[in-house]
Image (cartoon, rainbow, N blue to C red):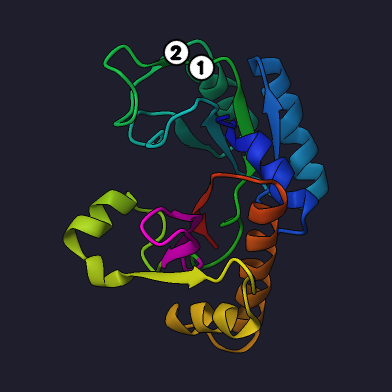
């Protein structure tokens, strides 16, 4: 069963995985109300509007946009809802967008952008073991990274009997070049993500980017 982004985030949050806050909306009025609520709860002044369809590459198709005020939230939501979104993972006809996810902009109001990473958990069918795939090149099309810079993609296989071991979570954080508090936060994130993957009996989790 494929899930929309907001549904996947609900699952992750239930297992203690820290996520980007967001509220789903079915029309531009709900989108504005959602943005106001997020501003009140998080302090963010900018919002990311994301089309909710079962396909990746939404940003390339115009399905993910940044709004810097409520007027832009209303206009962008109105433009995206009802559109046929075409991405590299849809047919030429695209997919109808019925809902958008209004998210806090995690970059606001910082002076610099945080590092972005890629991470997924899936079954390696060749070995029969679960595998964590990760990269320092988050925010990009992972297929492009695999083709052009495969050395920047790492994998960590997990023994199904032992589960994810603490040293493996630390290894992932180390390979991502993290230290100090960021190192500790990443090991906690990896552990929670793998727990969510196992306990929800999912076929695949993919988060891009991880901040």
Relative to 61, is 83 on the left or the right? right
Quarter placement of the N terminus: top right
Mark 2 and mark 1: span between their CA atoms? 6 Å
Going 43% across and 65% down the picture, which residue do you hit?
134
Q: Which residue is mark 2?
A: 83
Instruction: Identify the main secondary structure in magenta.
Output: strand
* Few, some or many residues within 10 Å of mark 2 (<14, 14–19, 20+): some
Q: Is residue 43 visible?
A: no
How many numbered callouts?
2
* Visible residue check, residue 208: yes
Q: Which residues are magenta?
A: 114-134
Whether the residues at callouts 2 and 1 have beta carbons within 8 Å, the answer is: yes
Residue 185 is a magenta residue: no
The residue under the point 72% across, 44% down is: 11
Q: Establish if 92 lies above or below 110.
A: above
The residue tagged with tag 2: helix, strand or loop?
loop
Q: Which residue is mark 1?
A: 97
Label 1 SS: loop
Q: Quadrant of the C terminus?
A: bottom right
For the point 75% across and 43% down, which residue is it? 39
Image location (x, y in percent) of residue 203: 54, 44
Mark before the other along the chain sequence, 2 or 1: 2
Does residue 149 appear to the left or right of 160 in the view shown? left
User: Magenta stretch: residue 132 in it?
Assistant: yes
* Position in image of residue 137 (x %, y %): 36, 64
Picture layout, residue 91 above or below residue 24: above
């Amino acid at each position: 069963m494929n899930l929309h982004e907001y549904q996947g985030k609900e699952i992750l949050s239930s297992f203690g995985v820290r996520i980007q806050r967001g509220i789903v909306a079915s029309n531009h009025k709900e989108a504005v109300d959602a943005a106001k609520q997020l501003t009140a709860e998080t302090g963010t002044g900018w919002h990311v509007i994301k089309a909710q369809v079962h396909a990746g590459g939404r940003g390339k198709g115009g399905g993910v946009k940044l709004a810097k005020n409520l007027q832009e939230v209303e206009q962008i939501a109105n433009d995206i809802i009802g559109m046929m979104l075409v991405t590299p993972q849809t047919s030429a006809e695209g997919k109808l967008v019925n809902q958008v996810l209004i998210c806090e902009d995690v970059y606001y109001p910082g002076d610099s952008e945080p590092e972005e990473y890629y991470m997924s958990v899936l079954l390696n069918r060749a070995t029969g073991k679960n595998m964590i795939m990760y990269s320092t090149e988050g925010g990009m099309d992972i297929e492009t990274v695999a083709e052009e810079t495969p050395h920047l993609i790492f994998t960590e296989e997990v023994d199904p009997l032992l589960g994810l071991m603490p040293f493996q979570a630390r290894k992932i954080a180390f390979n991502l070049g993290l230290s100090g508090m960021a190192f500790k936060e990443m090991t906690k994130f990896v552990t929670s993500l793998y727990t969510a993957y196992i306990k929800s009996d999912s076929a695949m989790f993919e988060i891009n980017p991880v901040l």
